[in-house]
Image: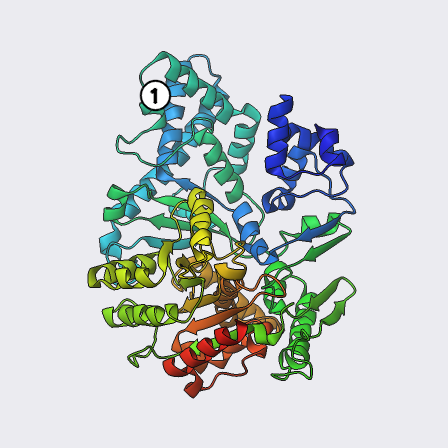
Amino acid sequence: LAMHSMVRPSDIEDMASLGKASHACSYYASREALAAAEVVVLPYNTLLSPQARQSVGLSITNALIVIDEAHNIPETLRALSSCKLSMQVAEAALAQLLAYTRKYSERLAGRNLFYLGQIRKILMAMIKYLKRGSSSQDDDGGLEGNNNRVQRKEMIAAVDLMFTLKLDNINLFSILRYLKKSRLSQKLLGFVNHTAATTTSDHVLNEPDAQNVEFMSKHVSSMSIFETFLDKLTGTSREGKIIVEWPSEESSTTSSISPTLRFVQIHSASQLDNVVEEAHAVILAGGTLRPFSHVAAELFGDDVDVMRAASEAEGQLSRNFDMLPKTTPNKLRPPPSSMAQITPSLTTFTCGHVIPPNNVITSCLSTGPTSVKLDFRHSSRSSNQMIDELGRTIMNMCNVVPSGFVVFLPSYKYESQVFQRWRSTGMLSQIDKLKRIHREPKNSRDVEDALARYSSEASSPSKKGALLFSVMGGKMSEGINFANDMARCVLVAGLPFPDITDPVLKEKMESLDREFRQRGTGINGQDYYQNLCMRTVNQSVGRAIRHSNDYAAIVLCDYRYSSDMRIWNALPQWLRRGSGAPRSEDASFGKVMKNVRSFFAEEK
């Protein structure tokens, strides 16, 4: 099977079918083929983690590595270096440890009992701290927003956590060495499984709280999660922080949210070093990598030369590539490519889209059909007036947009509010008569079926088409191909700025501000914040226009798209090139409807 996979390359589904047919394991066959393979396709996590590469036997020495959708790399690196320890997992680990100690205390040496006692002390201190913080939410004023039921978060340094827990006199390094050498987590897992098979007290060892609803795998020891958390605490990273999360009283009793200690890595710079040093070259590819200064700050923030060169390259592209005239002598000719050599170790390359400018129309919409200002800022977007105006806008657009129509909303919560309001006013049924409504599913496993249903109706001969509601940054905003009739129009409602109160984001922005002041190059915190938002918008818009003959209308539904030039300039060059800088008179509902109607009339 391994030889077959190299002679005739197969995708995952084909390999699985071949494995079943030949009664062989497709996974181990793939691993067997690694040593002789010339091209290897694998997920981010396996590539970026040295431990994962070693476990599967993958060597990247002198390899050429191509990372697609590379804008996801910073977040992936942060996820790989982070871990969390919930109160329920800590309680499970403590319960297992106590049961294990009671059963084998007479057989254990004094040294073992000492370390088990130290581990018990650490677990009890963490549990006490999480319980105390959760019960005192209403008294300390540390809540986000004005709602007492909102989850509270605090950020502290790893050293400060140990002082807060009054555990600064415990040598965590020796505790960690003992855990690894004694293989305590494996012993506890075997002990728990054996006890569960012979007694009825499995819930005591695995579910310390009778109302526990958090999933804890029976194949992973709770002590191993605790051990991983200690390993992060004793790491050498200067950028590591502890986020303490306490749920509200309401959410803690109605959902699986539990008080949690979470270790996070603020900066992902230097975490890519192990890949860059081993490989011959690394290519970061994607449609939303610009501005290059943002990517450089995320991945190469410790290299001042690269940061400065990336900023210079971005400035050069902004002057010589982005500011192209609205029209060209040959209207069907795609925009020219541009390449900039930065340093001997870093090259940037930017090119235009494969479609001609007249295959896409970009419209900024500032007012709705009844002249209500479209303001989707968090403070105003949930009003009945704004939701109703959005509904009227979509209803009118359905009358001129053929086939598939995709609407992106800023969050899942807002999508629920919109549907609840439209359902109560009857507007939902009115829209459904114009185009059959589909919604992004909550479960990732249902995405494929939902797309199949939407595609079938969007491309139906009746040309009534279909309307799909999705969420920016959600399951359908990236990696989904809405080609041809699946997305003749994409409407983006609002701007998906991340939560500014998030402690990790605040720390990241403050850190970038300090570095920008010291170096005079790179990006500051505010630019980083805006880039995160616009990258999500650009990913959503990019679901349409999938080949050179495709065409679509892009409607940006929020007054800020036309009034704030920073937001307009953060859109892809291929979107702005065919439309020019927005003017207030062009952002009225009547003008936008006229332009969109004319666009589809010409494309027919």
Q: Amino acid at mark 1?
A: Asp
Q: Quadrant of the N terminus?
A: top right
At label 1, counting other C-alpha atoms closer than 10 Å, the crowd grade (few under 14, some 14-19, many 20 or more) is some
Residue 210 image position (x, y, % from top left): 26, 30
Callout 1: SS? helix
Task: Give the residue displayed 54% in from the left and 80% down from the top.
Answer: 579
- Label tally: 1
Residue 456 image position (x, y, % from top left): 45, 51
Work out whether residue 517 can be spotted: no
Residue 515 image position (x, y, % from top left): 57, 68
Task: Give the residue displayed 30% in from the left and 71% down from the top.
Answer: 392
Compared across the picture, whether 409 is left or right of 212 comes to right
Work out whether residue 450 can be spotted: yes
Task: Give the residue displayed 54% in from the left and 55% down from the top.
Answer: 481
In front of the other: 101 or 228 = 228
Residue beneath label 1, please? 202
Farthest residue toward the left?
Answer: 424
Task: Give the residue displayed 69% in from the left and 81% down from the top.
Answer: 330
Residue 290 image position (x, y, % from top left): 60, 68
Residue 520, quarter of picture: bottom right
Compared across the picture, whether 424 is left or right of 527 comes to left
Compared across the picture, whether 381 is left or right of 467 comes to left
175 over 271 or under it: above or below? above
Colour pattern of the rendering: rainbow
